[in-house]
Image (cartoon, coloured by chain):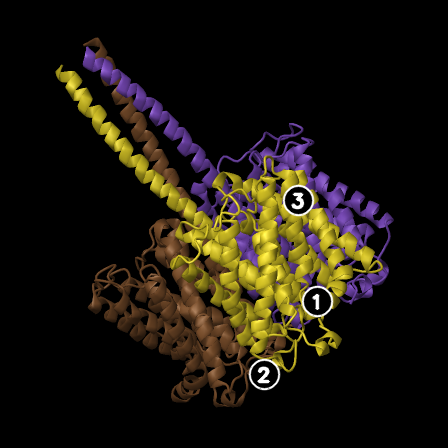
Chain colours: A purple, B yellow, C brown
């Protein structure tokens, strides 16, 4: 009897110790996983600031402006998104602090995509205004399609892990909306020139986007899915890069367009977004190939037609890089993700495009009230050179 | 009785197993946390090598020299700091191997800040000499204010997590000390020219600093504080970037100075250093705004006055980017950190400035003995073009 | 008796709980360690895409081509390596998914090194062909010397953690093999020109390689060895950078060659590869110094002699940056690693050089059949400018 009392106490102590330790370990492991997300959030920041920033430096006389605009767009959007989340206006999908940062960065990415359309035709202060108007619209759409905001879609049933639809297509369509009001006739006659140096800077930005893209798509996936997601993204980007090379040669009489390489090579990353954690390697590579070819085709053939319909110039061709490949990615999920909720997927795509088109067009009208640049695509108007 | 003996053995075995496992897990978790610090150390290296390196490429004819100088400054300072730590001359705050690397990088950062002041007026070999003289002085100050070297301040009571004072203000004041001896009258008449390409490179360097800054401030904080610290730093940088935009327009007749954007946008990162892990989000954003405005004001208004007083040229304006915002950050801690040791905080700031000013001025005199460049701000003198 | 039955059950439950938890934790910790490797794989990707890409932009008229070639080489090699591994043709050293990605990146790195030799004299499509031919040869050698493919070397006894031999020397020797067939007499008279902008881009690429190099060497080492490995690599790079500075001045009449700085500064990273996780700090620093001096000597003195023997131009001087320092690193292991298997180390070096020389020469012959550029080192031939 004495011994079993002793054993009882010992077992009890062991249980408590065990419970305490396992709880401490869990907390510690949770912190470690959050720090790993933090690492990916820095990779995303590299894409936002240096990647998007320098990709847009291809306009040869507008380099200082493009990177300054990038700085301003990031600096207005991240605090604003965190503020909107903080006051609980729209309950975003983020729970932990680092998730909030990552979803704020996603919003900033979508804004930068959007800003590529009117790039060079906004005054510097108007980029800030664009950010102020864009972020609430983005948060509204995110709340509806990812957060089950209006109960139109069951939370979690719309598949868009890496944001093909919510980030890329939303930003691109919003941007196309703004250019309807933010393009003058004169600007249609004005060439958007690049040179050897601006092309090299643009390719640098492209490369920074390419190489950090796996962290964008894997930002909030569980640790055990990160490696597979990363390889999928790299295969999709590789497929797009190869497809861009062959397509650009086919569409430019055997010559290569540096702008196609800098841009369409990234279309694989855009298109794999929705299925980055679910696709197999072959599917990822094939999605990349299709996206690269589609994007290059968009730059060479479709863009002039779209621009004449919209009566607006899409400076960076965001329709080709983010719009079409994004929608392709959202649709690809229907064929790839087993047991997908077809209605939710189509609703998510449709609602996003609709909200982006409406709010983008209205935003363009509002910004156009605040005035126009006198000279487009040129640092000289606003910089002290 | 037989059963309870069996139970006793079982419980004993379980305890041993449990002890072994928990010890193995702790070791494993410690290694994992060290590797997470390693990741941040690489981010800091990106700031040192590519960030500071290219920020200084704004001098249009001195680009190869600026990046070569960066290479030399990093390559001399990190081994030297590790050597000084290894022989136990000053017991730095580092315990683990990765901590040693991070504190060595902090020393290199301070040296690079310092070198921004005489940039373009030192011979290449003199940058190495500057590093050899700077690092022991830096380690001395670090030992006194962070490591309780002379018992002037209780260890840990001076708050400077991200180095507003110890890294930024020290480097800047040391640099101002050196230029007293390292500027000729002729150089006051010589413009320091930039062009579109050098500006774009400088903005690239600026962006690399901006985006990796959270890892600089969070380098040695505990895992559970990394997310909050990171968001604080990003908010401070965002605030500074926006403030810089409005201030530069106000001070340049409605035009933007690209140099202000490239530099003052970073002042938020400098100023949040002391309180990066303790401030709330709003405080971080406000510190950033004040730092950005102060730094821009420094570049536009104060710098010529300081230069004429010191009879020295501060090529990169380190006083404006690192000096004043650093001191601002150290003082801000007094208002933000609850239960702060006021005496320790003021002593830490005062001692650092004093040591930097004295050792910097002496170092300038020593270097000036080793000769002068014949042409300033120009690769052609020393490079085989 | 009742109590001890109760205790028996309690202890049994505890054991099961404990077993479950420890297994769950182990899985979770394994995932975390894989994600940490993922982080290093992204750093390596930064080296491949932006690092190698921009290092090769030093050819002033060939910048768009150099980075496009980099994109194509990475995009063909990583999927191809993963495919070869997937079908089990050669059993590579990778086990987990993220290991496969890292070893695929190593293969891509070796290919990029190789491509530096004929750079500027291949048509864009020929870079893809080079990748298609190179990767199986690389995988064959990797299988033989690292994977014990033909039982020539015991698995694991050949020391080459960071790939001095298997990655760097293999790629360089293979590249030298290709140029025998891929250089015309006319090209010997054609200067390979750089200018201030191409030099700055090249130095940017160099810096990205330098700063992420610790992750290349530490990619697959155990967590507890990552910090020591990282510091070794940084010390080796620092040593090489300082040695390059003094050697380039000595060999260029007191002037500095920007190309030497951009390239030879990296030789420390190449040479420390074999012993990055085993060397002490002093040995690492010394290996770096020797490698930097050797590499600079190669660029200035040996390269013309080798080129006239091979009747081929080594555009990027891969023999000097990757060939000689790589072999130096493999040999250094003999003196540094205690208890090294001398036969295995020498066999590994010898087999690698032999396979690279034979397969490289054959590959050059095959590629030369597919035609020749009419103008070398110039974007204009293939880009739509």
Q: Is residue A360 left or right of residue C221?
A: right
- Callout 3–callout 1 Cβ contact below 8 Å: no
Q: Residue furthest left?
A: B2
Find numbered disc 1 in the image and state the secondary structure of the residue it sits on.
Answer: helix
Q: Position of residue C248 (x, y in %)?
A: 48, 80
Q: Quadrant of residue C92?
A: bottom left
Count neighbours of disc 3 (C-alpha within 10 A) and say few if under 14, some if 14 to 19, many if 20 or more.
Answer: many
Q: Chain of mark 2?
A: B
Q: Quadrant of residue B109?
A: bottom right
The one nearer the camera, C306 or B18, is B18
From the viewer's perspective, is the residue at label 2 or at label 1 nearer? 1
The dot on residue A78 is 3
Q: Chain of mark 1?
A: B
The one nearer the camera, B26 or C3, is B26
From the viewer's perspective, is the residue at label 3 or at label 1 nearer? 1
**Which residue occupies 42% across, 82% down?**
C297
Q: CA distance from mark 2 to mark 1?
A: 35 Å
**Which residue occupies 71% across, 71% down?**
B195
Q: Which residue is mark 1?
A: B310
What quarter of the picture does the C terminus of chain C occupy?
A: bottom right
């Amino acid at each position: 009897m004495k011994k079993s009392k002793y054993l009882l106490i010992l077992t009890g102590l062991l249980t408590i110790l065990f419970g305490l330790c396992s709880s401490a370990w869990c907390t510690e492991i949770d912190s470690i996983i959050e720090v790993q997300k933090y690492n990916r959030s820095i990779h995303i920041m590299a894409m936002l600031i240096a990647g998007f920033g320098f990709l847009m430096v291809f306009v040869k006389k507008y380099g200082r402006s493009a990177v300054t605009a990038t700085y301003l767009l990031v600096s207005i959007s991240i605090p604003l998104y965190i503020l909107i989340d903080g006051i609980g206006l729209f309950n975003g999908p983020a729970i932990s602090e680092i998730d909030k940062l990552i979803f704020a960065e996603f919003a900033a990415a979508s804004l930068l995509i959007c800003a590529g359309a009117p790039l060079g035709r906004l005054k510097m202060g108007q980029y800030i205004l664009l950010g102020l108007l864009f972020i609430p619209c983005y948060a509204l759409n995110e709340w509806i399609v990812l957060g089950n905001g209006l109960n139109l879609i069951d939370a979690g049933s719309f598949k868009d892990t890496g944001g093909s639809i919510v980030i890329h297509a939303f930003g691109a369509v919003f941007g196309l909306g703004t250019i309807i009001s933010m393009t003058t006739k004169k600007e249609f006659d004005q060439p958007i020139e690049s040179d050897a140096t601006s092309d090299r800077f643009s390719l640098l930005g492209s490369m920074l986007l390419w190489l950090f893209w796996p962290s964008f798509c894997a930002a909030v996936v569980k640790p055990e899915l990160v490696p597979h997601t990363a390889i999928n993204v790299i295969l999709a980007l590789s497929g797009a890069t190869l497809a861009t090379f062959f397509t650009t040669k086919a569409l430019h009489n055997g010559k290569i367009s540096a702008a196609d390489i800098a841009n369409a090579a990234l279309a694989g990353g855009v298109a794999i977004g929705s299925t980055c954690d679910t696709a197999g390697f072959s599917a990822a590579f094939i999605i990349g190939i299709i996206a690269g070819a589609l994007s290059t085709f968009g730059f060479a053939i479709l863009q002039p037609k779209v621009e004449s319909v919209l009566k607006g110039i899409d400076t960076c061709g965001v329709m080709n890089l983010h719009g079409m490949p994004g929608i392709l990615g959202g649709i690809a999920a229907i064929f790839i993700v087993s047991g997908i909720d077809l209605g939710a997927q189509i609703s998510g795509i449709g609602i996003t495009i609709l909200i982006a088109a409406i709010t983008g067009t209205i935003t363009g009208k509002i910004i156009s009230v605040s005035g126009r640049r006198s000279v487009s695509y040129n640092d000289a108007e606003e910089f002290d050179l």
